[in-house]
Image (cartoon, rainbow, N blue to C red):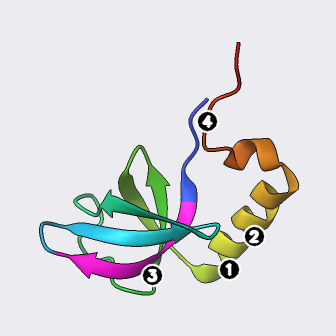
Amino acid sequence: MCLAIPAQISELHEGNMATVDILGVTRDISIDLTPAAKEGDYVLVHAGFAIEVVDEQFAQETLDLIRQFPELAADEAPAA
């Protein structure tokens, strides 16, 4: 299963790239699919791409749910 995780844009870069904060971890992502996204916005991130700009309330509610299930926020897939 794939999930899109809310992240807050902390910095914009050239080439439609941005640095985001996802549960305290920073990642560089592409904002090619969300060119209107700006610093401070929350975006849904899937496979290294921001796929939608979302409001802060939605982002926080989703992050609160993710925090209830730490295995969803794991950086590595569990062993089969």
Q: CA distance from mark 3 to mark 2?
A: 15 Å
Which-is-in-front pick, marks 2 and 4? 4
| Residue depicted at x 33% and y 77% | 37
Q: Which residue is mark 3?
A: 41
Q: Which residue is mark 4?
A: 76
The part of the image, by quadrant, that contains residue 25 is bottom right
Nearer-N-terminus badge (1/4): 1
Q: CA distance from mark 2 to mark 1?
A: 6 Å
Bounds of the magenta segment: 6-13
Which-is-in-front pick, marks 1 and 4? 4
CB within 8 Å, label 3 to label 2: no
Crowd band around label 2 with a 10 angstrom C-alpha radius: few (<14), some (14–19), many (20+)? few
Q: Which residue is mark 2?
A: 61
Q: CA distance from mark 1 to mark 4?
A: 27 Å
Nearer-N-terminus badge (3/2): 3
- Identify which amino acid the numbered label 1 is placed on: Gln
